[in-house]
Image: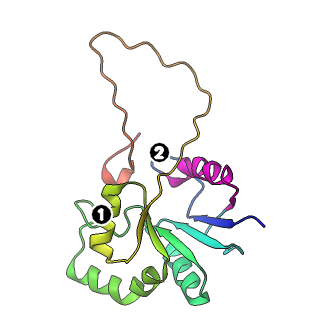
Amino acid sequence: MAFRVAHIVSSACTEPGSVAICLPGLVEQLRDRGIVCTITDPTTIPDADVTHVHGWNDDSMRSVVTALSRKGCRFVLSPIGGLSTGTYNAWTFGDKLRFLLQHRGGIRSARALVAVNQLEADRLGRESRHPRVVVLPYGTVVAPSEPIPQVVAGSKRLLYLGSLHPRFGCVA
Protein backbone atom coordinates (compact mmCIF):
# COMPACT_ATOMS: atom_id res chain seq x y z
CA MET A 1 0.00 0.00 0.00
CA ALA A 2 1.33 3.44 -0.95
CA PHE A 3 2.14 6.09 1.64
CA ARG A 4 -0.55 8.80 1.62
CA VAL A 5 0.07 12.50 2.22
CA ALA A 6 -2.73 15.05 2.44
CA HIS A 7 -1.74 18.65 1.66
CA ILE A 8 -3.97 21.29 3.21
CA VAL A 9 -3.77 24.79 1.71
CA SER A 10 -5.86 27.81 2.56
CA SER A 11 -6.39 28.70 -1.09
CA ALA A 12 -5.88 27.15 -4.48
CA CYS A 13 -5.48 30.65 -5.90
CA THR A 14 -2.40 30.81 -8.10
CA GLU A 15 -1.49 34.44 -7.45
CA PRO A 16 2.22 35.22 -7.27
CA GLY A 17 3.54 34.19 -3.87
CA SER A 18 0.85 31.57 -3.26
CA VAL A 19 1.89 28.08 -2.20
CA ALA A 20 -0.57 26.80 -4.82
CA ILE A 21 1.97 27.76 -7.49
CA CYS A 22 4.66 25.46 -6.06
CA LEU A 23 2.51 22.66 -4.69
CA PRO A 24 2.01 20.83 -8.02
CA GLY A 25 5.79 20.49 -8.38
CA LEU A 26 6.13 19.12 -4.85
CA VAL A 27 3.28 16.67 -5.43
CA GLU A 28 4.91 15.56 -8.69
CA GLN A 29 8.24 14.94 -6.93
CA LEU A 30 6.52 12.89 -4.22
CA ARG A 31 4.47 10.93 -6.79
CA ASP A 32 7.71 10.01 -8.56
CA ARG A 33 8.78 8.41 -5.27
CA GLY A 34 5.57 6.38 -4.96
CA ILE A 35 3.79 8.68 -2.49
CA VAL A 36 0.08 9.31 -3.11
CA CYS A 37 -0.92 12.95 -2.50
CA THR A 38 -4.24 14.71 -2.16
CA ILE A 39 -4.75 18.47 -1.96
CA THR A 40 -7.62 19.92 0.03
CA ASP A 41 -8.74 23.07 1.81
CA PRO A 42 -9.01 23.66 5.58
CA THR A 43 -12.65 22.54 5.73
CA THR A 44 -11.69 18.89 5.20
CA ILE A 45 -9.25 16.75 7.13
CA PRO A 46 -8.71 13.75 4.88
CA ASP A 47 -7.68 10.28 5.93
CA ALA A 48 -3.92 10.05 5.30
CA ASP A 49 -0.74 8.67 6.80
CA VAL A 50 0.49 12.21 7.37
CA THR A 51 -1.00 15.64 6.74
CA HIS A 52 1.12 18.54 5.49
CA VAL A 53 -0.38 21.89 6.56
CA HIS A 54 0.84 24.69 4.28
CA GLY A 55 0.54 28.04 6.01
CA TRP A 56 -0.06 29.51 9.42
CA ASN A 57 -1.19 33.02 8.54
CA ASP A 58 -4.94 32.72 8.95
CA ASP A 59 -7.39 31.38 11.50
CA SER A 60 -8.62 28.52 9.31
CA MET A 61 -5.13 27.03 9.07
CA ARG A 62 -4.49 27.45 12.81
CA SER A 63 -7.83 25.70 13.42
CA VAL A 64 -6.69 22.79 11.24
CA VAL A 65 -3.50 22.45 13.31
CA THR A 66 -5.54 22.52 16.53
CA ALA A 67 -7.96 19.86 15.17
CA LEU A 68 -5.13 17.60 13.97
CA SER A 69 -3.39 17.97 17.31
CA ARG A 70 -6.53 17.11 19.30
CA LYS A 71 -7.25 14.07 17.09
CA GLY A 72 -3.70 12.80 17.53
CA CYS A 73 -3.07 12.87 13.76
CA ARG A 74 0.44 12.90 12.37
CA PHE A 75 1.12 16.21 10.66
CA VAL A 76 3.91 18.52 9.59
CA LEU A 77 3.59 22.28 9.33
CA SER A 78 5.04 24.65 6.75
CA PRO A 79 4.45 27.99 8.47
CA ILE A 80 5.51 29.94 5.34
CA GLY A 81 6.67 32.92 7.36
CA GLY A 82 3.78 32.81 9.81
CA LEU A 83 6.03 32.04 12.79
CA SER A 84 8.80 34.48 11.95
CA THR A 85 9.10 37.97 13.28
CA GLY A 86 10.51 40.66 11.09
CA THR A 87 9.96 44.05 9.55
CA TYR A 88 6.51 43.24 8.20
CA ASN A 89 5.21 41.18 11.08
CA ALA A 90 6.94 42.57 14.17
CA TRP A 91 5.23 41.16 17.23
CA THR A 92 4.40 43.15 20.34
CA PHE A 93 4.71 41.62 23.79
CA GLY A 94 0.93 41.04 23.77
CA ASP A 95 1.14 39.28 20.41
CA LYS A 96 3.81 36.91 21.72
CA LEU A 97 1.89 36.18 24.91
CA ARG A 98 -1.38 35.56 23.02
CA PHE A 99 0.44 33.29 20.58
CA LEU A 100 2.04 31.24 23.34
CA LEU A 101 -1.23 30.79 25.19
CA GLN A 102 -3.32 29.92 22.13
CA HIS A 103 -1.10 28.10 19.66
CA ARG A 104 2.12 26.76 21.14
CA GLY A 105 0.60 23.33 21.85
CA GLY A 106 -0.57 22.87 18.26
CA ILE A 107 2.83 23.74 16.85
CA ARG A 108 4.58 21.44 19.33
CA SER A 109 2.27 18.62 18.20
CA ALA A 110 3.61 18.85 14.64
CA ARG A 111 6.05 16.05 13.86
CA ALA A 112 8.23 18.66 12.15
CA LEU A 113 8.25 22.22 10.92
CA VAL A 114 9.04 22.37 7.23
CA ALA A 115 11.21 25.10 5.73
CA VAL A 116 11.88 25.65 2.03
CA ASN A 117 15.58 26.47 2.52
CA GLN A 118 18.30 26.33 5.17
CA LEU A 119 18.04 30.03 6.04
CA GLU A 120 14.36 29.64 6.87
CA ALA A 121 15.11 26.42 8.78
CA ASP A 122 17.72 28.14 10.95
CA ARG A 123 15.32 30.98 11.73
CA LEU A 124 12.42 28.62 12.48
CA GLY A 125 14.62 26.59 14.80
CA ARG A 126 15.64 29.69 16.75
CA GLU A 127 12.23 31.33 16.93
CA SER A 128 9.94 28.33 17.41
CA ARG A 129 12.27 26.16 19.51
CA HIS A 130 10.65 23.17 17.79
CA PRO A 131 12.85 20.08 18.17
CA ARG A 132 12.64 19.12 14.48
CA VAL A 133 12.91 21.53 11.57
CA VAL A 134 13.47 19.99 8.14
CA VAL A 135 14.18 21.47 4.72
CA LEU A 136 11.87 20.42 1.89
CA PRO A 137 12.35 22.54 -1.22
CA TYR A 138 9.07 23.01 -3.02
CA GLY A 139 9.20 21.89 -6.63
CA THR A 140 7.96 23.75 -9.61
CA VAL A 141 6.32 22.61 -12.78
CA VAL A 142 7.21 24.83 -15.68
CA ALA A 143 4.40 24.92 -18.19
CA PRO A 144 5.16 25.52 -21.84
CA SER A 145 5.16 29.23 -22.50
CA GLU A 146 6.03 31.72 -25.13
CA PRO A 147 9.71 32.13 -25.94
CA ILE A 148 11.59 34.59 -23.77
CA PRO A 149 12.27 37.77 -25.72
CA GLN A 150 15.86 38.46 -26.59
CA VAL A 151 17.70 40.57 -24.06
CA VAL A 152 18.42 44.01 -25.40
CA ALA A 153 21.99 45.18 -24.82
CA GLY A 154 22.15 47.22 -21.63
CA SER A 155 18.83 45.91 -20.23
CA LYS A 156 18.64 43.92 -17.01
CA ARG A 157 16.39 41.12 -15.79
CA LEU A 158 15.72 40.01 -12.26
CA LEU A 159 14.71 36.51 -11.21
CA TYR A 160 13.19 36.64 -7.74
CA LEU A 161 12.46 33.35 -5.97
CA GLY A 162 10.54 34.26 -2.87
CA SER A 163 7.21 35.40 -1.50
CA LEU A 164 5.41 38.24 -3.20
CA HIS A 165 2.43 39.62 -1.37
CA PRO A 166 0.66 42.99 -1.50
CA ARG A 167 0.83 43.37 2.29
CA PHE A 168 4.62 43.46 1.99
CA GLY A 169 4.41 46.16 -0.65
CA CYS A 170 5.35 43.65 -3.38
CA VAL A 171 3.08 43.14 -6.34
CA ALA A 172 3.67 41.24 -9.53
Question: In this picture, is 29 found above or below 89?
Answer: above
For the point 56% across and 75% down, which residue is it? Answer: 75
Left or right: 68 as drawn, with respect to 16: right
Q: Residue furthest right?
A: 1
- Residue 31 position, x and y percent, is 68, 52
Q: Which residues are magenta?
A: 18-38
Kindly identify which residue carries mark 1.
122
Q: Quadrant of the N terminus?
A: bottom right
For the point 49% across and 78% down, which residue is it? Answer: 110
For the point 41% across and 83% down, which residue is it? Answer: 103
- Residue 12 position, x and y percent, is 60, 55
Question: In this picture, is 161 found above or below 118?
Answer: above
Which mark, residue 10? none
- Residue 114 position, x and y percent, is 45, 64
Give 155 or 134, whichever is nearer the viewer.
134
Q: Residues within 10 Å of mark 1 (few under 14, many from 20)?
A: some
Is residue 43 in view? no
Q: Amino acid at mark 2?
A: Pro
Please say whether residue 163 is one of the residues in the magenta stretch: no
Kindly identify which residue carries mark 2.
16
